[in-house]
Image (spheres, rainbow, N blue to C red):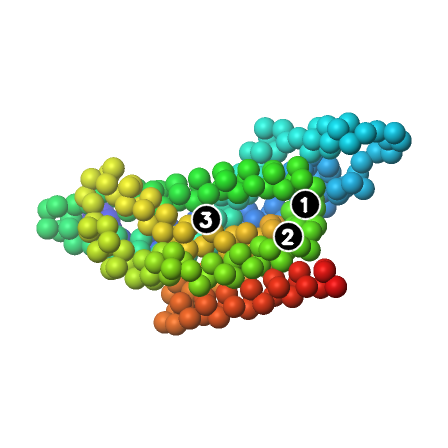
Amino acid sequence: MAVSALDAILKRDRTIVALCLAAITALAWLYLFSLAPSMSDGSIPVDGMVGMSGMEAMPDMPGMDMPGMAATVASRFAWSPGDAALVFTMWFVMMVGMMLPSAAPMVLLYARVGRHAEAQGTPFAATGIFAAGYLAVWLLFSLAATFGQWLLERSLLLTPMMESRSTVLDGVLLIIAGAYQWTPLKYACLSKCRAPVAFLQATGGFRRDAAGAFAMGVRHGAYCVGCCWPLMLLLFVGGVMNILWIAAIAFFVLAEKLLPRGDRIGRIAGALLVGAGVWVIVRVLQ
């Protein structure tokens, strides 16, 4: 009796996969919510300058020459291994929370086809292996984002809340993100993300072995990064730990990938972003 009950549950594998995806996404968002207050009160020294910002935190050093000041700034903004690990963890969890929902259709399709293949005696590798390949790409992206954040902080371009302190930088990032929405590369990547069948045709179908399934997940993740990486730059405009800003970008990514006219929504948003970026820069130059 217990065996038959377990078998009945396992036959609902798509439901199980969907619940797992939802649980992982929820845990990621809970982590971000728990981390945000610590970031806002400066208790987590991600920039080595707890509760302080930029040159305001520099001590008065009359007569110090520019090389000496640069050395002092570099030493003050040095990250410890713990700081780097914290920022990397924050970025990766954020990417999981933002991107996993939009990948759910492809993951669920893999689980469904895998179930039919198993019934025919030719099972696929576990769905988790495919999902792990997808998340591995975002893990690499998180490493790059961590390095980018370190560079911006070393250049005194970020506040302790991890948002840009440069209006010109804000404008440039808005223009980059908006203009990319109209590029052929964006459209090519988005088309694969919006249509799992098109992705399967481009990759030659499902892979049954574990290595092939992982590589397939990596490829799907690469299309996803190619589609969304400029939008992630906007986190530096609104604040990397601004929960509402993170949620707004996540909802836009989800709408762009899943809604019937999502590609048009993306292009309209791109035009608006470029306009906003130009307006921001013009205001500075006036």
Residue neighbourhood size for the residue with mark 3, other residues' Cα within 10 Å, grouped as few (<14), some (14–19), many (≥20) = many
- Residue displayed at 65% across by 50% down: 163
Q: Are marks 1 and 2 in contact (CB under 8 Å)?
A: yes
The kind of residue on which mark 3 rests is: Val
- Residue displayed at 56% across by 64% down: 274
The kind of residue on which mark 1 rests is: Leu
Tag 1 secondary structure: loop
For this view, does 41 lie left or right of residue 1?
A: right
In the rendered image of this protein, does residue 274 appear above or below residue 22? below
Locate the C terminus by quadrant: bottom right
Circle 1 residue: 157
* Mark nearer the N terminus (1 vs 3): 3
The kind of residue on which mark 2 rests is: Leu
Work out how far the residue at label 3 is from the one at label 2, CA to CA, in angstroms. Answer: 26 Å
In the rendered image of this protein, does residue 122 appear above or below residue 192? above
* Mark nearer the N terminus (3 vs 2): 3
Q: How many numbered markers are drawn?
A: 3
Asked if residue 249 can be seen in this view, the reply is no
Residue neighbourhood size for the residue with mark 1, other residues' Cα within 10 Å, grouped as few (<14), some (14–19), many (≥20) = some
Asked if residue 2 can be seen in this view, the reply is yes
In the rendered image of this protein, does residue 85 appear above or below residue 121? above
Task: Residue 285: give x, y in percent of width and height.
Answer: 72, 60
Numbered circle sitting on residue 96: 3
For this view, does 240 lie left or right of residue 259?
A: right
In the rendered image of this protein, does residue 139 appear above or below residue 106? above
Tag 3 secondary structure: helix
- Residue displayed at 47% across by 58% down: 180
Circle 2 residue: 169
- Residue displayed at 52% across by 68% down: 271
